[in-house]
Amino acid sequence: MAKSQMTPDLTSINLIGEGSEVEGTLKSTTDVRVNGRIKGDLLVEGKVIIADKGVINGKMKAKSADVAGRIEGDIVVEDRLVLKATAEVEGSIRTGRLVVEEGAKFEGTCTMGRLDAARKAAIGNGHSGKSIQPALNS
């Protein structure tokens, strides 16, 4: 039995191809795949896929995301954020769930967990929630 989730509607995926560069804010109500570079914010109501050669210099906000490339800026993902082994992230992460593959690089702070309406509104306005800081071994 085939799952409909396995076959995305390719007409509803926006693509920033390798060798392409976008400056400014990119907003989309559907999924976005980035193989090129975005200098600015990426605001997506669906899923974001950052390919291994994809780069974002700015804030990214999405329903869900898979990152294999580089992001220099804050990330807000409502559901699940996956950092692939080749991912490099500098900035804060706010997400419902986080999956980090071995080899992924992350420098910054991370806030995870289910977001209630008040916290979701605060994050949407750029206010920070409680951050998880790694413990240092003495």
Image (cartoon, helix red, strand yellow):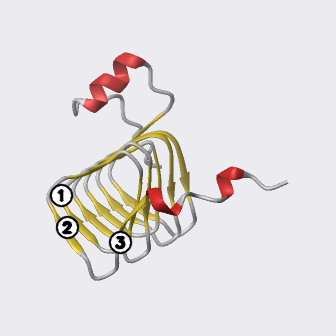
Where residue 40 is drawn, which disc sits there?
Answer: 1
* Residue at which label 2 appears: 22
For label 1, the crowd category at 10 Å Cα-Cα, with few meaning under 14, some 14 to 19 and many 20 or more, is some
Quickly name the residue at label 3: 54
Tell me if residue 77 can be seen. Answer: yes
Q: Which picture quadrant has residue 21?
A: bottom left
Indicate left or right for 52 with 39 as reference. Answer: right
Q: Residue furthest top?
A: 118
Image coords of residue 105 (percent x, y): 42, 65
Question: Residue 78, position in %: x, y?
Answer: 44, 37
Image point 28% across, 82% down: which residue?
19
Distance in Å between CA atoms under marks 2 and 1: 8 Å
Q: Residue at x 34, y 80 (%)?
A: 18
Q: Quadrant of residue 22?
A: bottom left
Please determine whether, in this image, residue 137 is positioned above or below residue 49: above
Q: In front: mark 2 or mark 1?
A: 2
Left or right of 133 in this view: 36: left
Q: Give the mark nearer the N terminus: 2 vs 3.
A: 2
Q: Residue furthest front?
A: 11
Nearer to me, 84 or 18: 18
Residue neighbourhood size for the residue with mark 2, other residues' Cα within 10 Å, grouped as few (<14), some (14–19), many (≥20): some
Residue kind at label 1, given as amino acid type: Gly
- Secondary structure beneath dot 2 equals strand
